[in-house]
Amino acid sequence: MKIGIVGAGFAGLSAAVFALERGWRVEVLDAIGVGGGASGVASGLLHPYPGKLARRSRNADEAMGASQYLLDLASQEMGAPVYRKGIVRKALDAEQAKVFEERALEYPDLKWDGHLHIKSGLTVFSKKYLEGLWRFCRRKGAILRIEKLDKVPRGYDAVILAAGHGMLKLTDLKLNCTKGQILACDLEKPVDVSVIGDGYLGIAEDGYHLGSTYEHDFEDDKPNLEQAKALILPRARRYVEGRIDVTGVKAGIRVCKPGDYYPMSCKVRPGVYALTGFGSRGLLYHALLAKEFIDHAYCSL
Ligand SMILES: Cc1cc2nc3c(=O)[nH]c(=O)nc-3n(C[C@H](O)[C@H](O)[C@H](O)COP(=O)(O)OP(=O)(O)OC[C@H]3O[C@@H](n4cnc5c(N)ncnc54)[C@H](O)[C@@H]3O)c2cc1C
């Protein structure tokens, strides 16, 4: 069985890992290379308590477990952890504080002490993680072809399209796109755990990320420093103490199913499948969806 996977982001590379573990031959095709899309700029926050109300995500245990499996595999390839443990959520008002306090009574991986500590939360160093996944794939015989495709490639027993924003050109799937920008920065008062407030402050390999914008009307996927500063910094001042020195800006495009936070895997046509719609929860769901997809494909293809 030889499969072609379009996209070397979280979705494509996780599918590649599970396919290789099944003994399939894998070719990954990407216009730019490993982490060329949204995955390469993601701030790396991974936890199952999103949104204002911090409701626990659907299939949280399975999703966190599958992601942890791949994080450990990538860490082993890289010879060092590709993530850091713990995330803190700061309540923005009394009403949210009350909700967080109640959540902490419901779930054992939460602790409330005036802030909500998500003990199961992780900050993933996205680029390192992707590099670790790719090293595993390469060691298992996968090939990476740098190629911008304008149609679904031929010559494979099956093709998995995991092309993020590029899905719009390769398929007729109805998907919504949101541009996101993050600021790379240094802080006057360092912190040792990622913080979610009005936006978030993520620990990066070499400093911090402040995020993020959610731009529904955008002309391109290019970063715009002044615009990102105007949208992000006023919010960050609500929960980051001391001076913030901005050192750079990055941008990517998130892809969602209309009206849904959850990703999708589906058949596009015989022999061609889609793995997409991860929105801002790519790290939570990529591994679980890819594993379920490959397990199912293994039984039916
Ligand atoms: C600023 C920002 C911050 C984020 N922070 C977080 C976070 O903290 N936590 C979290 O869980 N999620 C976060 N996300 C969301 C996360 O990045 C996405 O959910 C995830 O990256 C989607 O992965 P993917 O593999 O589906 O797509 P992508 O990573 O976009 O991968 C698609 C790949 O396909 C390739 N491609 C596209 N078209 C073609 C073509 N025609 N031919 C060949 N190759 C093609 C691209 O080059 C790319 O490498 C963030 C997103 C943004 C934009």
Image: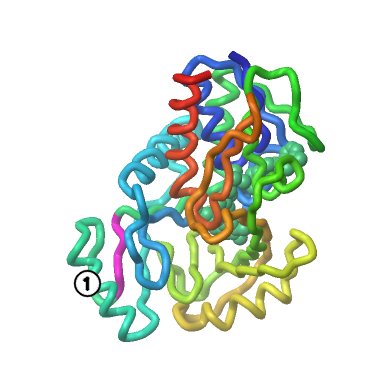
Would you say residue 117 sits in the magenta stretch?
Answer: yes
Outermost residue toward the front in this view: 269
Q: Is residue 227 left or right of residue 254?
A: right
Residue at x 69%, y 27% (from the top left corner): 144
Name the amino acid type tagged 1. Answer: Glu
Q: Depth check: give the residue in front, 34 or 283.
A: 283
Count how many numbered circles sit on residues in the image: 1
Residue 43 visible at all: no
Quarter of the N terminus within the rendering: top right
Would you say residue 167 sits in the magenta stretch?
Answer: no
Outermost residue toward the bottom in this view: 94
Where does residue 209 sit, x and y in percent of width and height?
55, 64
Q: Which quadrant of the figure has residue 106? A: bottom left
Q: Which quadrant of the figure has residue 115? A: bottom left
Where does residue 44 sit, x and y in percent of width and height?
50, 54
Residue at x 52%, y 72% (from the top left corner): 187
Q: Is residue 8 left or right of residue 90?
A: right
Q: Depth check: give the residue in front, 171 or 54.
A: 171
Pointer 1 residue:
102
- Residue range highlighted in magenta: 115-119
Please determine whether, in this image, residue 62 is positioned above or below residue 73. below
